[in-house]
Image (cartoon, rainbow, N blue to C red):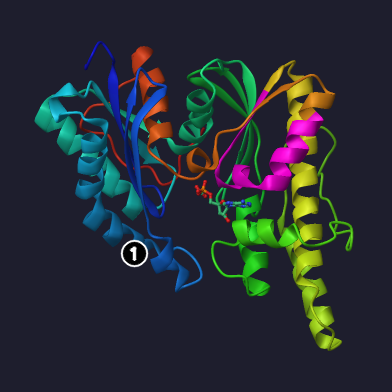
Amino acid sequence: MKDGKFLTLGIESSCDETAAAVVADGRTVYSNIISSQIEIHKLYGGVVPEIASRQHLENISTVIRQALEEAGTAPEEIDLIGVTKGPGLVGALIIGVAAAKALSFAGDIPLTGVHHLHGHISANYIAAPELEPPFTAVVVSGGNTDIIDVRGYNDLVLLGATRDDAAGEAMDKVARVLGLGYPGGPKIDALAGKGNPHAYEFKRVLLEKGSYDFSFSGLKTGVLNQINSLKQAGEDIPEADIAASFQMAVMEVIVQKAVGAALEFGRDRLALAGGVAANSLLRTMMEQECEKNGIAFFRPQPVLCTDNAAMIACAAYYRYREGLTDDLTLDACPVLEF
Ligand code: KG4
């Protein structure tokens, strides 16, 4: 406690960002330190799990110390430690979980393990102080494309998920073939702005009627086949048109299903989350479709969309308020049900 505020230290290390944050009363960010490993993984065209673990190990203490310093907080003023327990890369998660347990034990501070996707959704509570459940959440990242009915802070029901590639993963793969580099999502986003989104009508896969699941691998293959046939015919690759048409095909399906879920479950609020939520087309299209249907639209600012620890601290705070804490047997869970 400091100045009457309940302080949560959040720790995140599920993939390639080592992050720590101090958040007051669950929603006010005092510090949000993110040490990205992207420059190292770029050399390999994607995240190398072994390298990620080693980098987390090297960085975690510094990142936590910086988060406390920037927040002007002493370790003994921390009331709760929240850490991502999964899903993610096991070797990466273990580093964050071990650091959180050590601090919890040393300072006798309550501890709670957070589901990474609860964290992503909670970024919206930070961005919009008025937002409370129930609402529809859409998590679109490098590993997930999920639609969730958020019934309470800790009562989340998964309505649909990708059956193969996540949207971000498909974007990263297409970007790689176009030679745009890693991570591909932001590169596709930027390039698409210069292209015609209707130059190619790539197939939109909606699956069975009423399903909130996604499938992007067929679309991805369709795009790769198009690039290969152009190459074989010796033609120039219209990169911007391909990026724009592909991006449109991905986002149209996400928007249609997400708004459909909100309407079916009678939700008048929809929140976007995850790295791909930073995508400019997705934001614009979702905003327009929500407005058309009388749904209030929420999305965090880009720094809260990609992996960060402020969102983990926020989710941890709402777990703690409902008595959901963990002891020192807390373990990293690479695969974790919703
Ligand atoms: O949530 P995140 O930081 O990590 C996890 O996957 O958990 O998301 C990373 C993903 C990557 O696939 C990246 O290409 C994508 O988010 N991404 C974007 C944009 N910014 C990041 N995709 C599309 N447009 C963007 N502006």
Residue nearer the viewer, 133 or 190? 190
Instruction: Tell me where residue 167 appears, x and y as whole percent.
Output: 66, 51
Q: Residue at x 85, y 36 (%)?
A: 209
Q: Quadrant of residue 309?
A: top left
Q: Residue at x 75, y 46 (%)?
A: 251
Residue nearer the viewer, 93 or 302? 302
Q: Quadrant of residue 223?
A: bottom right
Question: Is residue 274 found left or right of 177 in the rendered image?
Answer: left
Residue matched to label 1: 50
Q: Quadrant of residue 231?
A: bottom right
| Element type at mark 1 | helix
Q: Is residue 61 above or below residue 122?
A: below
**Residue furthest toward the top?**
4
Question: Is residue 214 found left or right of 187 in the rendered image?
Answer: right
Q: Is residue 206 above or below residue 106?
A: below
Say which amino acid is labelled 1.
Glu
Check residue 274 for magenta coloring: yes
Q: Is residue 155 above or below residue 216?
A: above
Magenta stretch: give its range. 270-289
Q: Residue at x 46, y 73 (%)?
A: 44
